[in-house]
Image (cartoon, coloured by chain):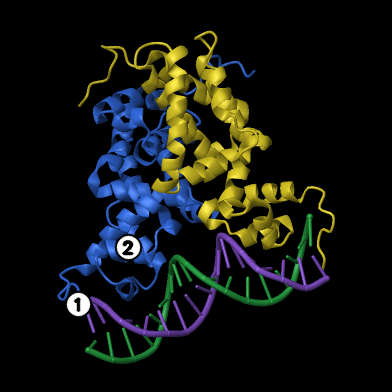
Chain colours: A yellow, B blue, C purple, D green
Amino acid sequence: MGRRPGGLSTRKEIVDAARGIFASSGYRGATVRAIADAAGVDPALIHHYFGSKEKLFAATLEFPVHAPDRLLAVLSGPREGLGERLTRAYLELWEDPATHGQMVIAVRASLSSDEAMARVRPTIVDMLSRAPASDVPGPDAQTRFALAMAHLVGVAAVRHISKVPPLRDLGFEELIARTAPAVQLHLTEGCEPGERRRTS
Amino acid sequence: MGRRPGGLSTRKEIVDAARGIFASSGYRGATVRAIADAAGVDPALIHHYFGSKEKLFAATLEFPVHAPDRLLAVLSGPREGLGERLTRAYLELWEDPATHGQMVIAVRASLSSDEAMARVRPTIVDMLSRAPASDVPGPDAQTRFALAMAHLVGVAAVRHISKVPPLRDLGFEELIARTAPAVQLHLTEGCEPGERRRTS
DNA sequence: GTCTATAAATAGATAGAC
DNA sequence: GTCTATCTATTTATAGAC
């Protein structure tokens, strides 16, 4: 039963299939066999091309995802639309079919265990430290930016991973319209002394 | 090497150890052997007491966590402090040592795969549908409440699972002070027609 | 109640034929 | 370049001795 004799781009098909399986099952839940089945190839081929499950996983995250750069770029510009620009740029990464899979895989994998998070944390810390130095206004810029990003990650995770009804089905522009004001609040209004809520 | 001859409450020790391992490694990453080691007992004892890894996992989530009830209760009362009450009630579940483990385990497990999420989703949908019927003001109450919760989940996940510096080290009261205003914004100010941002 | 020994299943990886 | 067959390690689970 000779399958796929002259593989024009078997490698790419494996990566695509792997993205689907990793995205829905997580790193540990995904098996090489399941990925091979989805790609329509033999499990041995995966090791032939990638060497190991972990290297295949890495290949799965590579291509686009210059997520940090795309987000940092959007911080420049007028303070007025800052919240909307960041909200749109980030949520587009999840909406765009070209990057959706990677976002799901990255968040799911990094949240799956302390060990996995330890490998990803440096990248996140680096981005958080580069961002506010330049463009996020006011003191505690780093904390504000982190809060804004935490908010966005939460919204994206509930919409695209938890897939819970109200947020899952919201139109993209309405989602932006409802989320951006709170992000803007974090980025620009933070908590000036006196505006701070009572602490107990 | 007879270990722990008269187990006063071996069962409880196993559950406590399991919480630690499940919280740091996730469901699939945790092995019965690792849990047994952490509890200082033989792996066979775990099956003796719980029957299977999955039932041990369920036992791990049981006790406190009436999270939904605690959150819904807090929605009653003056609209003014609504954001802060909800923020405080939810983030306290993560801060309190008695419930911290379960929150980590529940979020980590439910986000780890589509299959796991499918088992948890009904509970979440139920809570989301019960909440706004009564106390969250305005139209689209359900959507607003969902956005507020997504925000809070994001903040909690970054602080307690990702453990990224700025949010990880923030004092609890300052975290509340910085988060509550955005939550309040979602719950009470939403987006009235005319206040909505341009859609492109 | 607790442990030893082992079964049974699953998964990642490799050798080699075609 | 692709597949068959198999190895080895790991893991959940069970049977039964002490």
Identified at 40% across, 67% down, the residue is B53
Residue at horizontal 68%, vertical 36%? A98
In this view, B137 is above or below A55 = above
Q: Is residue A169 left or right of residue B188?
A: right
Three-letter amino acid code at the position of disc 2: Ile
Of the residues shown, which amino acid type is indicated by label 1?
Gly
Percent from the top left, x then y, of residue A159?
Answer: 54, 39
Crowd tier of the residue under label 1, counting other residues whose Cα lies within 10 Å: few below 14, some 14–19, many 20 or above? few
Picture residue at 41% right of the left edge, 20% below the top: A186
Residue receiving disc 1? B2
Q: If you read the primary sequence from the N terminus, does the residue marked by circle 1 or circle 2 appear first? A: 1
Horizontal side of B57 relative to A74 (left or right) equals: left
**Rendering coords of residue B22 (x, y %):** 36, 55
Query: Which label was assigned to residue B35?
Result: 2
Q: CA distance from mark 1 to mark 2?
A: 18 Å
Tell me residue A26's x, y (percent).
Answer: 53, 51
Residue lying at 15% horizontally and 70% vertically, measured from the top left: B8
As rendered, which of A72 and B138 lies closer to the eye?
A72
Q: Nearer the viewer, residue A90 or B124?
A: A90
Q: Is residue B51 visible?
A: yes
Q: Quadrant of residue B182?
A: top left
Apparent side of residue B45 relative to residue A106 in the rendered image (left or right): left
